[in-house]
Image (cartoon, rainbow, N blue to C red):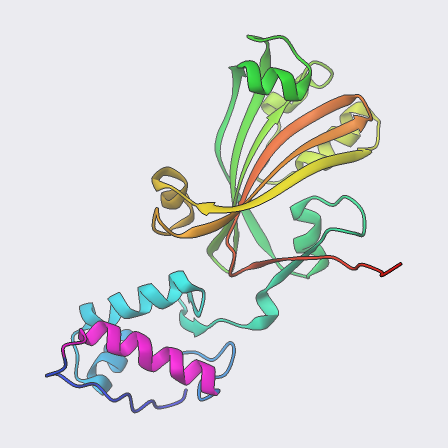
Amino acid sequence: MTKLDLDIKKDSIVPIYQQIVIGLQDAINRGDLEPAEKLESEQNFAKQLHVSRGTLRKALSILTRKGLLNKRHGKGTYVSSEEHDIAYPLDVGLHSFAEVLKAHHLEYTTSVIKQELKKANSKVAEKLHINVGGLYLYLVRVRKVNGESIMLIENRVNIEQIPELVSTDFTKKSLFSEIERLTQSKIQSSTSTYEAVKVGRIRGNLLKIDSDDPILKMQQVVYLKSDDPIEFGTVWLKGNKYLLTTTSQRV
C-alpha cells in the first residue's frame, strides 16, 4: 500500500472531504496509486490524514461513484483497474451481456428483482407484436462483478411460445440461452439505441449510485426471425465500467 501525503488544509474554504477527493484524484492521475492497488483501511487512512472517518468515507464514496475507486465487500477499497473496463463490441455479432462478461473472464452474480407477468401497454404491444393487454414476462435483474452492481437489465419477453420462462431461475440461467433452447431457434438479430441519461432514484438505488448520476441506457428489440420479435429490453450500464466499441473502414 502506498502511503499518501495529501495536503489537507483545515482552514481552507474548500471542504476537507473535497480536498481528499481532489488529492486522491491527482494521485491516481499521476500514477502514485496503481490500478487495482488497495488503499489503507478507513480507520488507518483517517488517522494518517488527521480527519474523521465520516469525512474520509464521504470522499471515498464520491470517488467510487466516479469510477476511480472500487469497494469490495469485506476486502476493502481499491483503485479501479483499467482491466475491469468491459468492451461491448457493436460490430462482431449479437451477444448477450452475460456472454460478454464471460468473454472477459469476469465472474459475475445475478440478482432477480422482479419476475412477473404483466399486461402489455401500447408501446410494449407494438414492440413485441402482441395485443394491448396481452401477457408478457417482465424480468428485472442486477448483475454484479466483484460485489459491485454494474448493470440493471429490464426484459419484456413474448412468452406465447415459451411459457416455461415464467418459472425459470434466472440467477443461474441466461435469458438468451433459454430462449434459444426452448424455442429450438437461434436469435437472429436486434435493433438497438443508446443514450446517456440520468439514472433516476429507483434505478439509482438498485445500482447504488445517485439519482443524478449519468448512465448509459440501451434499448433493443431482439428477433428470432426478421418479423418475429421475442424480447424488448432496456439495459442500464455504468459508464465507468462499459465501453461500446466498433471498427469502421473508410471506403
Q: In the image, is residue 15 part of the stretch drawn in magenta?
A: yes
- Magenta part mainly helix, strand or loop? helix
Tell me the quarter of the image containing the N terminus: bottom left
Look at the image and tell me whether residue 216 can be seen.
yes
Give the side of residue 247 with respect to residue 47, left or right.
Answer: right
Residue nearest the observer in this picture, 151 or 217: 217
Residue 12 found in image quarter: bottom left
In the rendered image of this protein, does residue 46 appear above or below residue 225?
below
Which residue is pictured at 73% across the width and 51% down the height?
A: 90
Residue 94 found in image quarter: top right
In the rendered image of this protein, does residue 183 appear above or below residue 201?
above
Q: Position of residue 26 (x, y in %)?
A: 39, 82
Q: In the image, is residue 214 part of the stretch drawn in magenta?
A: no
Q: Position of residue 89 (x, y in %)?
A: 72, 54
Give the side of residue 230 with respect to residue 66, left or right.
Answer: right
Residue nearest the observer in this picture, 94 or 212: 212
Which residue is pictured at 46% across the width and 87% down the height?
A: 30
Q: Position of residue 179 (x, y in %)?
A: 73, 29
Give the side of residue 231 with respect to residue 189, left or right.
Answer: left
Q: Which residues are magenta?
A: 13-30
